[in-house]
Image (cartoon, helix red, strand yellow):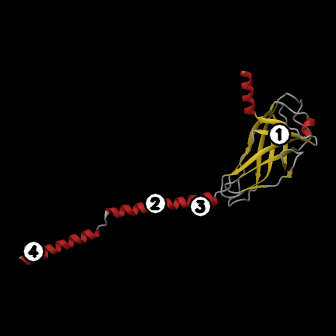
Amino acid sequence: MNDFGTHGTSRASSHAHAGFQGRRPVFTDVGSAIAAVVSLIALLFSGYTFYETVLKQAELRVYTSPLIHMYRQDFRDVFAIPVTISNDGAQRGTVLSFDLDITHRTTGQTQRFQNLHFGASPRGDVKLFTPITVAGGGSYSNVVLFHALETGSFVETTGGVELPLRLTLKLNVDQSDGWFGLLAPPPVTFEMTANFIASLRDMESGRPTQLHDARWTAARAKAKAAE
């Protein structure tokens, strides 16, 4: 009787121990799941960082100044426009040239300009325009001199008169840059106004007509009228 009871108890204990060994603790499964999620997040973050710092295609943006200068040279209008080009991508981007169209907002007269030089004035220290390469995450700033393709002028009367102009600036980029080719950013359109126009002789000698952002000019005129 005692032997039978002992053997029965032993067998029951063995089965219970085997059953305990066959079940994995719950905290082990939860820990493994957390570790897998953390590893996945780290992998995704590493992939995103690699894309942002190595693979991301160049994204060029162009910004212009709220103040530009107008000159004259060889019976043509010349505009000195400060530009900043930023690259929000990881790969380099190259600007080969610009297209600049300017329209007189009142008369509708339009002229096309080409970028020929870097420099603040055609009478100053100028350098020939060369393609601009902007490294990933970098920027570039300079003053570009745009010369009209045809003779003539937007100026009909000088002195204390307005010259309202609309400028459209387009970047021509090297589309072979990068892994998949660089896409040109959309053209930038902005409006500038002069409220005093220098004489043609002054502009030819290097004394400019100043054109301000049209919003600044309008705000100044409104403030002056309220005085």
How would you rate the neighbour count of disc 4 (Cα within 10 Å): few for under 14, some for 14-19, many for 20 or more? Answer: few
Give the labeled residue for mark 1.
Answer: 69
User: Number of marks in the image?
Assistant: 4
Question: Percent from the top left, x then y, of residue 172?
Answer: 77, 51
Labels 1, 3: front one: 1
- Is 220 placed above or below 151 here? above
Type of amino acid under label 3: Phe
Give the labeled residue for mark 2.
Answer: 38
Type of amino acid under label 4: Gly
Which of disc 4 and disc 2 is earlier in sequence?
A: 4
C-alpha distance separating marks 1 and 3: 43 Å
Question: Percent from the top left, x then y, of residue 71?
Answer: 87, 40
- Is 10 placed above or below 225 here? below
Labels 1, 4: front one: 1
Residue 50 - label: 3
Residue 5 - label: 4
C-alpha distance separating marks 3 and 4: 69 Å
Q: Secondary structure at mark 1?
A: strand
